[in-house]
Image: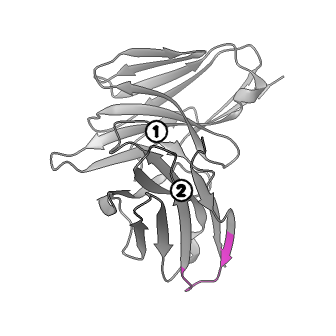
Amino acid sequence: SQQGEEDPQALSIQEGENATMNCSYKTSINNLQWYRQNSGRGLVHLILIRSNEREKHSGRLRVTLDTSKKSSSLLITASRAADTASYFCATLVEADTGFQKLVFGTGTRLLVSP
Amino acid sequence: DAGVTQSPTHLIKTRGQQVTLRCSPKSGHDTVSWYQQALGQGPQFIFQYYEEEERQRGNFPDRFSGHQFPNYSSELNVNALLLGDSALYLCASSLPGFRYEQYFGPGTRLTVT
């Protein structure tokens, strides 16, 4: 089963606009990671935020994490056509036994039109 | 520096057959994880290999098995293929565990007819 749920499922914007994607999850996490996937190919890691962090920036990307609400958001500023892709959040779930699992959400499909 | 490589790119098999997929990790990485991604869904964790042993496993049946070699490369084997096994199979390498970012390969598209 998938822990993360991205919202919206699809987003269509114009170049230059900002895009915001949200991720909600169910259980306690160690970290949360965002990935991008172009046209059903391999995923590219964008940013990792640890459970004790609230905000992180990387270039045009800004990620926030609210562990009390079990949610995260990814903001892409000044979007470009090349940002068109599917975006996934992934949460690191760690059990007391030491078992770890990286659980991906269902993804947001972003379309940026020129 | 070569990233994660996977072979083959595409594969078509018949129901009931067996398949082996291969993965070479990024240089410097010793941990390999495998994921199954059905169309329109997020990747689902199959298992993770470190030091040639399966360390973590997701909710996949025993028909899914793997192996890691001394050079850290890995294989994913699926026996008795079902139509529902049709998916993109992704390999990711990293430093040990999941506390670090995963570097993904381009995937192998498996179609079971």
Q: Looking at the image, which residue is at 34% across and 37% down?
A: B99
Horizontal and vertical percent position of residue B89: 56, 60
| Type of amino acid under label 2 | Ser
Q: Are marks 1 and 2 in contact (CB under 8 Å)?
A: no
Horizontal and vertical percent position of residue A86: 63, 38
Q: Looking at the image, which residue is at 53% across and 79% down?
A: B81
The quarter of the displayed image where residue A25 is located: top left
Q: Residue A40, can we see it? A: yes
User: What subunit carries mark 1?
Assistant: A
Q: Magenta region: which residues?
A: B11-18
Horizontal and vertical percent position of residue B39: 62, 56
| Type of amino acid under label 1 | Glu
Secondary structure type for disc 2: strand
Task: Write down the residue under mark 1.
Answer: A5
Q: How much space separates mark 1 and mark 2, taking CA atoms?
A: 31 Å
The quarter of the displayed image where residue B20 is located: bottom right
Which quadrant does the C terminus of chain B fall into?
bottom right
User: What subunit carries mark 2?
Assistant: B
Nearest the eye: A4 or B74: B74
Pick out the residue farthest to the left.
A96
Task: Write down the residue under mark 2.
Answer: B24
Horizontal and vertical percent position of residue A73: 48, 23
Q: Magenta span: helix, strand or loop, mainly?
A: loop
Q: Residue B37, can we see it? A: no
Is residue A22 magenta-colored?
A: no
